[in-house]
Amino acid sequence: MARNIDDIQRDIERTRRQLASTLDELADRSKPENLANDAKAAATEKLSQQNVQIALASVAALVVGAIAFSVVRSRRRSNDLKEVQRLLSQR
């Protein structure tokens, strides 16, 4: 059954409005400010989860431990070098 021209024109207009609405929504979503706000909200939500907080605390503890170990090792090496220099200077 053939469609009426008025029906076809109404369909075309409805499709144009839907397309314009979709394009407006895509333009709004792709604004840098909105992208940054979405990323901030997602990060805040993720950081509020307890298992993420535990993982971050564990990583922080490992980093602090590694730095402390490095400092102690460096001081020990420095003291060893000073001892070697002292022994060599006594010869």
Image: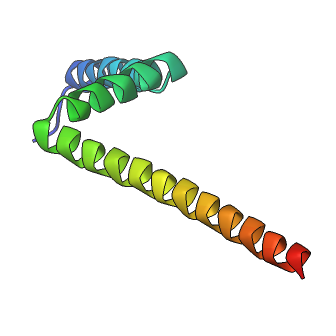
Q: Is residue 67 above or below residue 30?
A: below
* Of the pair 15 and 54, the residue shown nearer to us: 54
Can you name the residue that lies furthest to the bottom here?
A: 91
Q: Residue at x 40, y 53 (%)?
A: 65
Image quarter (top left, top right, bottom left or bottom right) of the C terminus: bottom right
Q: How many marks?
A: 0
41 vs 30, left or right, is left
Which of the 4 image quadrants contains residue 42?
top left
- Residue 78 is situated, as x and y percent measured from the top left of the image, at 70, 63
Q: Residue at x 42, y 51 (%)?
A: 63
- Residue 62 is situated, as x and y percent measured from the top left of the image, at 36, 54
Q: Is residue 2 above or below residue 8?
A: below
Q: Is residue 68 above or below residue 23?
A: below
Q: How is the image coloured?
A: rainbow
Q: Residue at x 87, y 76 (%)?
A: 90
Q: Residue at x 36, y 45 (%)?
A: 60
Image quarter (top left, top right, bottom left or bottom right) of the N terminus: top left
20 vs 76, left or right, is left
76 vs 24, left or right, is right
* Of the pair 73 and 66, the residue shown nearer to us: 73
* Of the pair 5 and 68, the residue shown nearer to us: 68
Which of the 4 image quadrants contains residue 79?
bottom right
- Residue 33 is situated, as x and y percent measured from the top left of the image, at 50, 16
23 vs 53, left or right, is right
- Residue 20 is situated, as x and y percent measured from the top left of the image, at 39, 19
* Of the pair 89 and 22, the residue shown nearer to us: 89
Q: Is residue 7 above or below residue 73?
A: above
